[in-house]
Structure formats: C-alpha cells, structure tokens
Image (cartoon, rainbow, N blue to C red):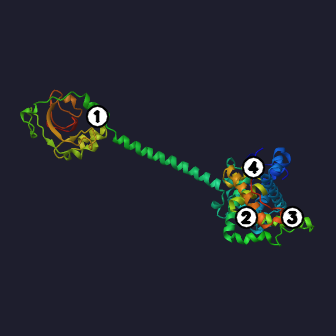
C-alpha cells in the first residue's frame, strides 16, 4: 500500500471507523508502522476519534428538560397542527426544502411564461403571415387585358379619369398614397375583402398589397386596364361586361392597389 | 404506546397529523434527544439547546403537513430546522458568549456525578475537544456534530444540511485537520496530541 492509497482510504472514514479499520486492516496497520508520516497522521486521527468519543459519551444522555415536552404537548393539545404560530417558519425550514419549493414554483412560472410567449408569438406570426389564398387568387386569375399599350402616351402618361376608353394610363405614384391601407390588406384574404370596403383612400384605391411594405416600397405605376368581371371576386357587375380598373403596380410587378372605374 | 414505538418517524408523523397525541408524544420523545444534543453541540449552551428543541417541535406542529417524505427523512428534516434555529440563536446572542460556556465549571453536562481521576481527565478532554469543536467555522462544525457526534451517515448529514455527500466528506476531513491542529496547540497533554501530524503523500 502506498501513502496515497493509505490517505485516500483513511480520509473516507470517520475517526471512529478509522480506529476500527486500523485494527482490522492488516495493510493499513503495516503501512502505518512502516511510514513515519502516515503513522503520525494515523495516530493523530486515532486520538481525535478518542477525544470525540469522550465528548459524545459526556453528552449522550443529554435531553431537553420535561418542561419543554410539557410546553410542546400543551401546544399540541390546545391548538393541534397548524394552529401554532412558529417562530419565523419560513426562515426555519431546511434550505433543501426551501430550495426545492423555490424551484418547483420557478418551474411552474417558467412554463407559464413560455406558454404566454408562445401564444403571443403565434398570434403575431399568424397576423403577419401573408395571405396565401389571396396570392394564389391573384396568380390564378387570368391576366388582365391591357387595353392600350403605353406607347400611346409615353413614359410620363398621366392618370386618366372617368374615361371608359381603352387606354393605359401609368404614372409614378407615391407610396404614401396607399400606405395607410397596406397593413390591413396584408393580413389575410378575408381581411383583404374587408379592406376593400374599409381601407379606401381618398382617391378610391383599395390596397391589395401582398408583400412587405418595407421591401416593395419602390416606384409604382397606375395602369388602367380592362378586367374580366369573373376574375374579380368582389365585382358584382354583369359577368359579360368587362370592368375597367386602375391598378397600382409596383416595379416588382406586384399589384399594390386597385380602383374600379366602372 | 407500545405499538407506536415500533412505528417509523414518518408513520408517527402521519398519525400525529390526524390528531393522535400518543403518536406525537412518541415522535417527540424519540427525536428530542438528538435535536437537543445537536443544538447543544453546535451552540455549547444548554439554554439555547432547550429553546431550539422547543422551537423545532413547534415548527413541526405548524408546518408538519408540509413535510414531504420523498425529500428526506423526518430526522434529517428536524436537524435541518434545528440548524436554522441554532444559527438564528447564535446570531442573536453572539457566539463569543457561548464559546466560554462549555469550559464553565457549572455546566451541568460537563460535571460528572463521580470524581475519580479518570473521570476528571475525561472531563478535561471533553471540555478541550468541545472548545475546539465550537471554534470551528459553522459549516465544518455542522459536519463534525452530525457525523462524529450524532453518528449520522454522510448521506443523512447531506440530507440535513442540503448539500452533496462529497461536500460533507470534504468538510469533515478539513474539520478533522483543524481539530487536530487546535488540540495540538491548546491541549497537547490532555489527549496525547503532540508532534507534527503532517501527512505524507509520497
């Protein structure tokens, strides 16, 4: 047995256990005899064990006086459990109990917080989600028939108004003209339908934006076009009559807003 | 009562919670001694030990229903409560006053009924050791009191103090080294502590 093994074995024992082991374990006894340092250490531990044993024996019969028992039993008889006001009970509880309760409550609070955050984020994502149905509808709808190419008016064509004639009118439009109606229109298809009745700007444009306003905030053009009535879900006119509409188209090709002219 | 003495602490507590006074009395009589001695060894004062014992069982009366057996034994729970009351008592009355108490001749626990030479020597040794124990830092003293003087296992002591078994083991080892040094310097002749007990780690 090496000194390290000796110390490791001895350190894992109380002085009393060490004293018992010393007499039983031949290897430890032999090492303690051979090694001066370990022998002295062992002797000091043995003496400490003896001293602690003496102290223990002196107080072995010590008990609380009968008056303590009387007081406690009196409290039990008169008030029973939970009727006695303990002295600062929260501070007196063992730390491990207090900690476990703390972590228990903390775990519940963490789960509740996670649920609230999850619901909040979910609601926000659902709100911000682009309306797939609306996009699909726009994509699936037949391409509008451009009545008259812009060649007739050139690049700086002004918006035509009130005319049912077949012409294309396009001009740069400031985004602020339709910005107010955009958020409501982005939410979903039903909201878009609702926006058609509620979010109408002063010029009569209904926002139909299907992209983030921060991304598609470039220049727009107003194009007057003739649309088949059955391509417009909200059109309630005669199916055979084409619908003339002014459509605000962004430079990315997406429709921003629309105004029914007739 | 004869049957109650065979019940475990947890069973007695359950019965006591149902209003069984005999069960509560049996639990008190079984556990008051260790709780009292723990407080006595920790504080060095019989008065503090009595107060702490009473407070611990009053606490049990008030919070007994909150005890959870899955978190530990009743004994460890009571030691944990006693530890906190001892700490509060010592904060209140300053530990210096208590430090001198074990050495006082009128300490009833250190005065023996007989007066042979052997008892006197043992009494002196006991006083010297107790002084050394009381001079230890609190967390080392707790480990010594629970494991060496109350005979708790490392696991039970860890439960009572709310720490890991390895922590108890290391605290105990460190406390023993400190005790040996203190006894070597304070009472070498009493218990045969003399010479250098430095460890050999070759």
Residue at the right extreme of this rendering = B116
Q: Secondary structure at mark 4?
A: helix
1 or 2: mark nearer the eye: 2
The foreground one among B104 and A174 is B104
2 or 3: mark nearer the eye: 3
Q: Alpha-carbon distance for marks 2 and 3?
A: 28 Å
The crowd level at tag 2 (other Cα within 10 Å; few <14, some 14-19, many 20+) is: many
Q: Chain of mark 4?
A: A
> Which numbered disc flags the more N-terminal residue, 1 or 4?
4
* Left or right for A160, reference A29: left
Q: Alpha-carbon distance for marks 1 and 3?
A: 96 Å
Residue A171 is situated, as x and y percent measured from the top left of the image, at: 12, 40
**Residue B171 visible:** yes
Q: Alpha-carbon distance for marks 4 and 3?
A: 29 Å
Q: Which residue is mark 3?
A: B122
Do the residues marked 1 and 3 share a common chain?
no
Residue A71 is situated, as x and y percent measured from the top left of the image, at: 76, 65
Q: Which residue is mark 2?
A: B52
Q: Alpha-carbon distance for marks 1 and 4?
A: 79 Å
Do the residues marked 1 and 4 share a common chain?
yes
Evaluate if marks 2 and 4 touch, with contact meaning CB atoms under 8 Å apart: no
Q: Alpha-carbon distance for marks 2 and 4?
A: 38 Å
Residue B46 is situated, as x and y percent measured from the top left of the image, at: 78, 67
* Left or right for B178, reference A115: right
> Which numbered disc flags the more N-terminal residue, 2 or 3?
2
Residue B29 lies in quadrant: bottom right
Q: Alpha-carbon distance for marks 1 and 2?
A: 75 Å
Q: Which residue is mark 1?
A: A134
Q: Which residue is mark 4?
A: A7
């Amino acid at each position: 047995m090496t000194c390290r093994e000796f110390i490791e074995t001895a350190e894992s024992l109380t002085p009393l256990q060490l004293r018992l082991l010393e007499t039983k374990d031949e290897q430890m006894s032999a090492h303690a005899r051979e090694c001066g340092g370990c022998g002295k250490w062992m002797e000091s531990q043995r003496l400490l064990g003896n001293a602690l044993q003496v102290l223990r024996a002196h107080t072995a019969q010590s008990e609380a006086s009968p008056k303590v028992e009387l007081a406690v039993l009196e409290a039990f008889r008169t008030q029973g459990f939970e009727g006695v006001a303990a002295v600062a009970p929260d501070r007196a509880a063992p730390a491990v109990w207090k900690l476990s309760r703390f972590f228990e409550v903390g775990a519940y609070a963490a789960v509740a917080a996670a649920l609230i955050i999850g619901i909040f984020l979910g609601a926000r994502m659902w709100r911000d989600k682009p309306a797939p149905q609306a996009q699909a509808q726009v994509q699936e709808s037949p391409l509008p028939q451009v009545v008259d190419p812009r060649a007739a008016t050139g690049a700086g064509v002004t918006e035509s108004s009130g005319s049912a004639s077949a012409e294309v009118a396009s001009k740069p439009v400031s985004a602020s003209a339709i910005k107010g109606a955009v958020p409501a229109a982005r939410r979903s298809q039903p909201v878009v339908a609702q926006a058609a009745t509620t979010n109408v700007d002063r010029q009569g444009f209904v926002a139909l934006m299907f992209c983030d306003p921060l991304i598609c905030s470039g220049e727009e053009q107003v194009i007057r076009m003739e649309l088949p009535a059955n391509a417009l879900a909200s059109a309630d006119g005669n199916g055979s009559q084409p619908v003339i509409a002014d459509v605000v188209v962004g430079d990315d090709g997406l429709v921003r807003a629309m105004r029914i002219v007739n | 009562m004869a049957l109650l003495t065979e019940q475990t602490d947890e069973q007695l507590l359950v019965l006591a919670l149902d209003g069984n006074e005999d069960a509560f009395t049996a639990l008190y009589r079984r556990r008051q001694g260790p709780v009292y001695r723990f407080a006595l060894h920790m504080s060095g004062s019989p008065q503090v030990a009595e107060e702490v014992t009473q407070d611990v069982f009053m606490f049990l009366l008030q919070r007994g229903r909150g005890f959870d057996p899955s978190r530990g034994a009743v004994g460890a729970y009571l030691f944990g409560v006693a530890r906190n009351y001892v700490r509060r008592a010592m904060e209140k009355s300053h530990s210096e006053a208590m430090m001198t108490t074990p050495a006082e001749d009128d300490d009833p626990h250190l005065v023996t009924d007989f007066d042979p030479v052997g008892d006197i020597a043992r009494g002196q040794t006991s006083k010297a050791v107790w002084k050394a124990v009381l001079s230890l830092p609190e967390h080392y003293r707790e480990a010594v009191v629970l494991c060496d003087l109350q005979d708790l296992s490392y696991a039970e002591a860890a439960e009572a103090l709310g720490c890991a078994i390895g922590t108890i083991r290391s605290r105990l080892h460190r406390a023993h080294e400190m005790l040996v040094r203190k006894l070597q310097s304070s009472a070498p002749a009493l218990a045969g502590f003399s010479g250098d007990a430095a460890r050999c780690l070759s």
